[in-house]
Image (spheres, grey):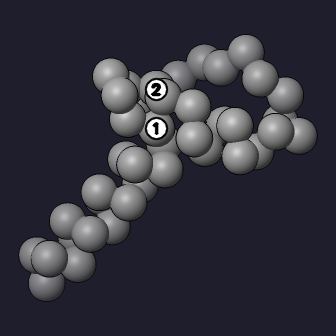
């Protein structure tokens, strides 16, 4: 996923929590990816 954000890198929390895909933030996407990989082991 390649997303452009108009935000300063000093605001890392904003970059991680801002919605980027529908209602999902980067945090949500990473969490789902990790839990999916752990569930498939």
**Given the current orientation, which residue lies at the most extreme right position?**
10
Residue drawn at point x = 49 percent, y = 50 percent:
27
Q: Is residue 19 left or right of residue 39?
A: right
Within 10 Å of disc 1 (Cα), the crowding (few <14, some 14-19, many 20+) is some
Label 1 residue SS: strand
Residue 37, x across and y down, in percent: 22, 70
Q: Is residue 6 left or right of residue 21?
A: right
Q: Circle 2 sits on which residue?
A: 20
Residue 3 in sight in this render? yes
Q: Which mark is residue 7?
A: none
Residue 19, x across and y down, in percent: 48, 28
Residue 2 in sight in this render? no
- The numbered mark, 2 or 1, whose residue comes first in the sequence reads 2
**Given the current orientation, which residue lies at the most extreme bottom position?**
41
Residue 2, x across and y down, in percent: 48, 26
Q: Say which quarter of the image contains residue 32.
A: bottom left
Of residues 16 and 3, the one drawn nearer to the viewer in this rendering: 16
Q: Which mark is residue 25?
A: 1
Label 2 residue SS: strand
Residue drawn at point x = 13 percent, y = 84 percent:
41
Proximity of marks 2 and 1: CB atoms separated by less than 8 Å: yes
Q: Quadrant of the N terminus?
A: top left
Residue 25, x across and y down, in percent: 46, 38
Q: Say which quarter of the image contains residue 21.
A: top left
Q: CA distance from mark 2 to mark 1?
A: 5 Å
Residue drawn at point x = 60 percent, y = 44 percent:
16
Q: Is residue 14 above or below residue 28?
A: above
Residue drawn at point x = 23 percent, y = 78 percent:
38
Q: Is residue 40 above or below residue 28?
A: below
């Amino acid at each position: 996923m390649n997303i452009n954000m108009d935000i300063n890198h000093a605001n890392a929390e904003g970059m991680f929590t801002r919605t980027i895909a529908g209602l999902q933030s980067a945090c949500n996407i990473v969490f789902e990816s990790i839990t999916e990989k752990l569930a498939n082991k």
